[in-house]
Image (spheres, coloured by chain):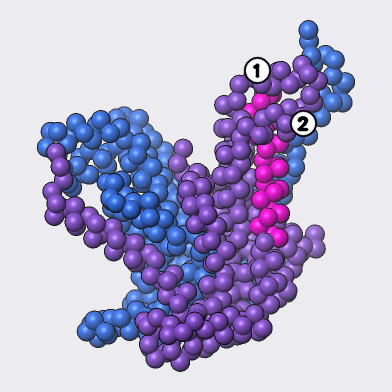
Chain colours: A blue, B purple
């Protein structure tokens, strides 16, 4: 008995309509804008109107004209710093917290929730909340430091170019630590308890346990975390915008590529930059290429490496 | 072999200091919103002497917070419903039919997970302008639906593939259509996956700040996160009102988290942990 033979032709073909809504929305609002940004970057733009085809002209301006070239490398360095601090502070602490939760302390369910809770806030709320807390005069951080007798530690955290970017990356770590912690925890829980027991019987414990038994078995989590952190750091926009505005104050000390891009494309809220869509699109393309190639290369090389094990 | 007592004590100390650092700023936000401006300035660390909801009264009077709230609810709920509907249909097609282009189609959707859509914001802005969606909540709904689809298709396709063929065949012999098979037979069996997709997209839509910042200028069309931007712009010295605004913005999500914390944590990491 052949069931499909009885189905009328139009009804049989109707199944091909199933992926159409998803495809249409996805192509129109994800694929098209990214592809179009590549196209835009080759044109001269007069405000919102497309002008002549100028080849790589926008890219040349971006890398050779003052102040763009200077601002580009300034912001690029900040993105890199953002990434490094997130790796060293957020992810190392996240691993330690995951290990603590994994060690079956009393209240580990509560601990997991506590670490994760900040991740549920909107980044703009996180930025504003910490801006209030880091206020040099009446913010909690400085008041607390003075109460503890560390008067000289109290600083204008967000107003001093020396501390502004680090402060923002720390706030970002506060926000993101729970997410990394959960991914590490899932990695830890995937290691068979027999392996850990066997090592323990052999007298391995403490940091040696982590370094020589656990970390090598968590390759997968480490790769995922690194790629996520990298993409996140090179997309960094919201927190900087909330805490230091579209100029990446003080004196561009917290400017990132995405904030710089926003300023070129939409004109910063202050400073009177004019909108330059061609240049903005060129910057978007460069940023896209940085994110895509570095993540792809990293994934490619780590896959090769873990396949050799 | 047992971990030594002092090492265990050290573990507890670190674990709970970590929890304190995580929770204290949120606790401070809550308590400060119940204090007066003078109390906050005089002693930012103290607990509120008496519960004062004055800041909330003022907030609701000065700022159209109720409008922001309903805009956020509308945008998040409609986006999530559309993602579920569209992703279920596409994943069902990819997972349950042997068409030769299905692998390519699946891969094409997955590509979206690697694309930072922020970088396409200029063409997206001009597109929204052209189709008349600037200053409309539908601009946000269409973007959230589009960026939610790749991961939703990944998760749902995985679940659809695990279901046995026999279920489907039995329904077809009884005369069920393709849609009937999908809707009445398979969808009820992948409820946990639907929950995961729902939670992670709801949080993304609820918290997003970037797209409304670009697409929405009209104050009455703002969602909560951009509403906070205007609040901080206008009342930057009214500290207790600012804390009240932050608290009110976060409370819905925090309450939902306490109601279903496990599902939240599983849902948000579903894209990374497989």
Q: Are marks 2 and 1 on the same chain?
A: yes
Give the side of residue A295 with respect to residue B122, left or right: left
* Residue under label 2: B179
Instruction: Please tell me which of labels 2 and 1 falls first in the chain.
Output: 1
Residue at 65% in and 54% down: B144
Residue B87 magenta-highlighted: yes
Image spot of residue B186 (x, y percent): 67, 30
Looking at the image, is A12 positioned above or below residue B115?
Answer: above
| x 34%, y 67%: residue | B21
> Taking the image as drawn, is residue B39 in sight?
yes
Badge number at residue A198 = none
Residue A60: % across, % down: 54, 63
Percent across and percent down for residue A23 are 71, 41
- Residue stretch rendered in magenta on the structure: B74-102
Q: Please report the residue visible at 25 percent of the width from the left and 30 percent of the height from the top.
A: A194
Q: Residue furthest top?
A: A1
Horizontally, residue B262 falls left or right of residue A92, namely right
Dominant SS type (magenta): helix
Residue B112: image x %, image y %?
59, 45
**Label 2 element class:** helix
Q: Which residue is mark 1?
A: B166
């Amino acid at each position: 008995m052949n069931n499909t033979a009885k189905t009328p032709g139009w009804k049989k073909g109707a199944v091909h309509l199933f992926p159409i809504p998803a495809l249409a929305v996805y192509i129109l609002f994800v694929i098209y804008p990214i592809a179009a940004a590549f196209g835009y970057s080759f044109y001269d733009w007069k405000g919102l109107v497309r002008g002549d085809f100028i080849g790589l002209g926008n890219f040349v301006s971006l890398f050779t004209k003052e102040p763009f070239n200077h601002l580009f490398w300034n912001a690029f360095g900040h993105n890199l710093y953002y990434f490094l601090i997130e790796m060293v502070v957020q992810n190392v602490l996240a691993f330690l917290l995951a290990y603590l939760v994994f060690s079956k302390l009393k209240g580990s369910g509560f601990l997991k929730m506590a670490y994760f809770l900040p991740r549920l806030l909107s980044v703009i709320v996180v930025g504003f909340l910490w801006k209030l807390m880091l206020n040099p005069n009446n913010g909690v951080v400085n008041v607390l430091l003075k109460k503890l007798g560390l008067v000289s530690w109290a600083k204008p955290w967000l107003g001093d170019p020396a501390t502004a970017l680090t402060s923002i990356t720390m706030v970002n770590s506060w926000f993101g630590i729970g997410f990394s912690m959960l991914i590490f925890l899932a990695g830890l829980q995937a290691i068979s308890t027999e392996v850990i027991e066997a090592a323990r019987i052999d007298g391995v414990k403490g940091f040696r346990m982590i370094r020589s038994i656990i970390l090598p078995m968590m390759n997968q989590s480490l790769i995922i975390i690194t790629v996520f952190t990298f993409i996140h750091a090179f997309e960094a926009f919201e927190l900087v915008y909330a805490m230091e505005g579209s100029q990446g104050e003080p004196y561009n000390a917290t400017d990132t590529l995405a904030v710089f891009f926003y300023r070129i494309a939409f004109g910063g809220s202050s400073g009177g930059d004019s909108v330059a869509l061609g240049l903005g699109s060129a910057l978007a393309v460069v940023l896209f290429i940085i994110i895509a190639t570095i993540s792809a290369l990293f994934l490619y090389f780590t896959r090769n490496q873990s396949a050799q094990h | 072999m047992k971990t030594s007592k002092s090492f265990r004590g050290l573990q507890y100390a670190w674990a709970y200091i970590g929890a304190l650092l995580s929770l204290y700023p949120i606790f401070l936000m809550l308590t400060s919103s119940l204090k007066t401006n003078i109390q906050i300035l005089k002693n930012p660390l103290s607990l509120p002497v008496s519960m004062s909801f004055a800041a909330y009264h003022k907030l609701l009077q000065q700022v159209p917070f109720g409008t922001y709230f309903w805009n956020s609810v509308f945008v998040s709920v409609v986006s999530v419903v559309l993602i579920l509907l569209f992703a279920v249909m596409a994943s069902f097609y990819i997972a349950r039919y042997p068409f030769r282009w299905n692998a390519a189609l699946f891969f094409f959707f997955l590509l979206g997970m690697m694309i930072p859509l922020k970088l396409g914001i200029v063409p997206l802005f001009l597109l929204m302008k052209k189709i008349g969606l600037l200053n409309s909540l539908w601009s946000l709904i269409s973007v959230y639906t589009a960026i939610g689809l790749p991961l939703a298709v990944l998760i749902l396709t995985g679940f659809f593939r695990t279901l046995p063929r026999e279920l489907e065949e039995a329904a077809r012999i009884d005369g069920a259509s393709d849609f009937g098979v999908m809707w009445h037979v398979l969808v009820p069996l992948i409820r946990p996956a639907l929950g995961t997709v729902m939670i992670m997209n709801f949080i993304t839509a609820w918290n997003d700040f970037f797209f409304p910042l670009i697409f929405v200028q009209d104050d009455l069309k703002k969602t909560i996160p951009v509403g906070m931007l205007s609040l901080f712009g206008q009342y930057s010295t009214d500290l207790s009102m600012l804390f009240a605004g932050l608290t009110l913005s976060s409370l819905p999500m925090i309450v939902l988290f306490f109601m279903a914390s496990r599902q939240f944590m599983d849902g948000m990491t579903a894209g990374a942990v497989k």
